[in-house]
Amino acid sequence: MTEIVLRVATETDDGPRMMARSQARGLMARAADCDRVTIDFAGVSEVSPSFADEIFRVWAHAHSGVAIEAVNFSPYVERMMRRAGWRA
């Protein structure tokens, strides 16, 4: 079994947040050949609906054999993940 841990990190004037679909694609680019992906949202205050959608709907559908786990997320980030189809 191959597992990768991806840490979501970016700096903005308003604090860490991920807003672009392209950022999600970049984050997930290394994960396609893994069996399990853990995404660490520690310190990330906000993600956009398109960022969450790209990971938890589009990418997850295209890589249905890969288990995705999310950790250390804020209530706001969790809301966006669930809106995109993530289930704990």
Image (cartoon, rainbow, N blue to C red):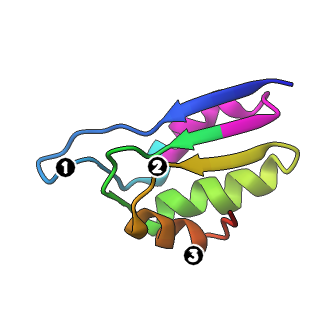
Total labels: the figure holds 3
Q: Is residue 80 above or below residue 10?
A: below
Q: Which badge, 1 or 2, comes first in the chain's sequence?
A: 1
User: Dot 1, crowdedness within 10 Å: few (<14), some or many (≥20)?
Assistant: few
Kind of residue indicated by mark 3: Arg
Is disc 1 placed on a helix, strand or loop?
A: loop
Is disc 2 placed on a helix, strand or loop?
A: loop
Task: Kindly identify which residue carries mark 1.
Answer: 15
Is disc 3 placed on a helix, strand or loop?
A: helix
Task: For marks 2 and 3, give the one nearer the viewer.
Answer: 2
Q: Residue 71 at what x, y percent from top left?
A: 54, 48
> Which residue is rendered at x = 63% and y = 39% of the image?
38
Task: Kindly identify which residue carries mark 2.
Answer: 72
The answer for how far apart the CA atoms under marks 1 and 3 are is: 22 Å
Relative side of 40 to 69, left or right: left
Q: Which badge, 1 or 3, comes first in the chain's sequence?
A: 1
User: Dot 3, crowdedness within 10 Å: few (<14), some or many (≥20)?
Assistant: some
In the foreground, 50 or 71: 71
Query: Which region is colored magenta?
Result: 24-37
> Which residue is rendered at x = 39% and y = 61% of the image?
74
> Which residue is rendered at x = 54% and y = 33% of the image?
6
Relative side of 61 to 42, left or right: right
Quadrant for the C terminus in the image: bottom right
The answer for how far apart the CA atoms under marks 2 and 3 are is: 18 Å
In the foreground, 13 or 88: 88
Kind of residue indicated by mark 1: Gly
Task: Kindly identify which residue carries mark 3.
Answer: 83
Relative side of 14 to 75, left or right: left
Kind of residue indicated by mark 2: Asn
